[in-house]
Image (tube, grey):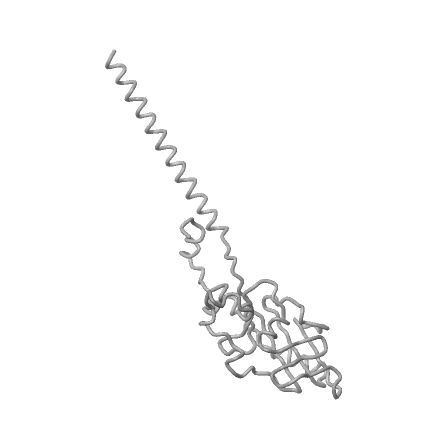
Amino acid sequence: MFSADLGIHVKLSDVRKSNILLVFIGFCIGVIGLMTARFIAYKSDNVHYHANFALYVDGTIDKFNGPGYYEEVQACTSENADNPRIRTHLHDENPSLVHVHAHTVTWGQFFTNLGYSVGDSVIQTGNGVFADDHNDNKLTFWLNGKKVDSIAGRVIKSEDVLLINYGKDDDITLQKRYDAVPRDAREANTKYDPAGCSGDENLTFWNRLKRSSWFE
């Protein structure tokens, strides 16, 4: 009788151990499955893309000479995270490549960050104020190959190409200037940007794994 009870007890103990092991294995499979799904679906919420532009006044392209037009990598710290200039700017002394690091940033905000001001019929640059119809000059905007009436309130979109021209130039000249605007935004979109306050971490395999797990 004692031997039979002992045998039953041993069997029940084995069953409990088996059940615990199965529960543990099931838990591990569930965790691994959830992490795998999070890893595959993970997308960084950082905003980081680029656009191109050029500005001509009286036939001369604005080269934005001077360090005041460009953001430095050192400016992208937690202390400066709320600085409007961090949202959109130039850097690396590339005067035609716009860096965007926030949602719904407009062309008007970009030029404000440069110390310029742009309206529908007037633009203020580092060289003065230039208004429509002054001495028969005209302020013209070409965005992505089309003439538009206003750009100040337009959100900068990835790989936009913008030409701003002030002068007495005909459409043939404007087309040539638009065609001459550099198109390096697409290439820049594929590269790691160390000056990106909102996109300052290269999303490597291990970064993605860490962010899709519960270790961060």
Above or below — where is 3 with respect to 189?
Answer: above
Above or below — where is 112 with respect to 26?
Answer: below
Q: Is residue 44 left or right of residue 107?
A: left
**Residue in front for this viewpoint, 72 or 12:** 72
Residue 127, given in percent of the width and then of the height, sits at 62, 86
Residue 50, given in percent of the width and then of the height, sits at 55, 69
**Residue in front for this viewpoint, 173 or 107:** 107
Q: Give the residue at the far front of this rendering.
A: 79
Q: In this view, does 159 lie to the left or right of 151?
A: left
> Could you say which quadrant of the image residue 25 lies in?
top left
Q: In this view, does 6 lie to the left or right of 213?
A: left
> Could you say which quadrant of the image residue 13 lies in?
top left
Q: What residue sits 51% from the left and 60% below the top?
A: 46
Above or below — where is 9 with respect to 169?
Answer: above
Residue 72, given in percent of the width and then of the height, sits at 47, 74
Q: Give the residue at the far bottom of this rendering.
A: 135
Q: What residue sits 24% from the left and 13% below the top?
A: 2
Q: In this view, does 91 lie to the left or right of 160?
A: left
